[in-house]
Amino acid sequence: MWSWRLARVFGIDINVHLSFLLVIVLGAMQWGSFGVEGAVFGAVLTLLTFASVTLHELGHSLVAQAFGIPVKDITLYPIGGVARLGKRPKTAGQELLIALAGPAVNVVLVFVLGALGAWAFGLEAMQHALQLGRTEDPTVVTLLATLVLSNAVLAVFNMIPALPMDGGRVLRAVLSWFMGAQQATRVSAFIARVLAVGLFALGVFYNPMLTLIAVFVFVGAGQEVQEQKISRILDGVQSADAVDPWAPRFAPDSTLADAVNVLTRTNWDAFAVEHFGRLVGVVTRADVLKAAQDQGPYAYVAGVMRRTAPVVDGREPLEAARFKMNESGEPFVAVVRDGLFLGLITELELVTVAERMAKAGFQRNDATLAPEVSLEVGKRSNW
């Protein structure tokens, strides 16, 4: 929501959030003291800086794709970029390489832009622009020098060892080789929160932006710990075992009046539409209510059902079912085994199983690493 697609690169949508326009305005204002040309320079500099951010996120995304991890999109926000991954990296080594790929892109840009500026304008001119660029009329040299500096800052800042930043993921990946994924996440989250308190203190006295980053790190570290617990629980339960045999199902010729009657007596949000035991579609609570209002109670469910659904094998863990929901953007997934439709899994089943297993004190040894995947179905890993 509030985002629009700017481009599509390597099958990945590059989106820009509406609030990003504010950053361009602020960039223009920072250089506005040099007149209209300065304001234009500031806007262009901001756009090129966020082009570097986009390349940073593409670094993460392309390495993830190389490991077979789907990437739905990259979205640019005022505080940076977010790449949404469709699966968790399977091993600590994969997470390590994915996390390092982003800052590595910025390091390469530092050398490329620095070499280009030194070749075109001379090393002394680049050094002068770095030192006094903001006190003189902006030029192309100033642009290149500032981009070199901003990419250096991006590389260094992102490597701060605080989850959910890249450096925190690198730290967790390394620690997991010695103490396991769960303990590594806890230790990394503790370090992140300590650093967040320090950043907050610096922000109060020096730069208010640091306080926002500190809050982001502190909250994100807690989410990482919680996510690790949920991922381990869902990884230990087969999808078939989470299917509720008592969940209501409709036939294609069921009327909307019949469907609404069922909705008033249940708390499910998605319902299978079957024909002689074969899944032919899925209808959601919202679809039924809207259609009943628009078409009347005697219309058929077949007219409003969704004819395709994400599918997971019943022998796969619930974590795989959650990723299928994430990848498709649907709040449900169809479970099949040996070609036989078993039923739907919705957010309700995921929450119910997670809560029940957590109360039972579920424990399982796990040698793999589980990076952040949102607890809310439909969201993805943020890099």
Image: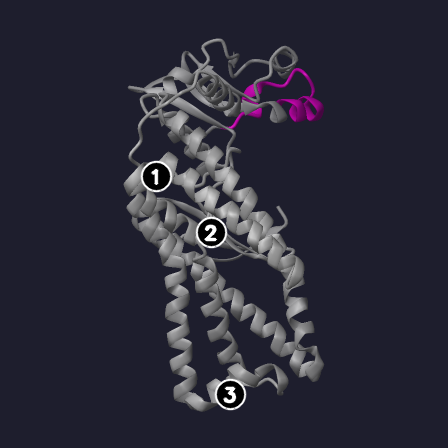
Q: Amino acid at mark 1?
A: Leu
Which secondary structure, mark 1? loop
Magenta-drawn segment: 288-306
How many numbered discs? Answer: 3
- The residue under label 3 is which amino acid type? His
| Image spot of residue 31 (x, y percent) | 66, 77
Residue type highlighted by circle 2: Met
Q: Please state the horizontal and vertical placement of residue 36, each as a whole percent of the image.
A: 70, 81
Q: Is residue 371 left or right of residue 376?
A: left
Badge 3 crowding class, 10 Å Cα cut-off, few under 14, some 14 to 19, many 20 or more, is: few
Q: Are marks 3 and 2 in contact (CB under 8 Å)?
A: no
Residue at image coords 57%, 55%: 199
**Picture colour scheme:** one colour
Disc 3 target residue: 128
Disc number for residue 142: none
Quadrant of residue 280 within the rendered picture: top left
Q: Secondary structure at mark 2?
A: loop
Disc 1 target residue: 369
Count residues near mark 1 (Cα–Cα under 10 Å), then give few for <14, some for 14-19, many for 20+.
many
Mark 2 or 1, nearer chain start: 2
**Which residue, given by chain and number where applicable, does mark 2 sit on?**
165
Q: Position of residue 357 (x, y in %)?
A: 44, 18
Q: Earlier in the sequence, mark 3 or mark 1?
A: 3
Of helix, strand and loop, which one carries label 3?
helix
As drawn, 371 above or below 277: below
* 3D distance between C-alphas at marks 3 and 2: 32 Å
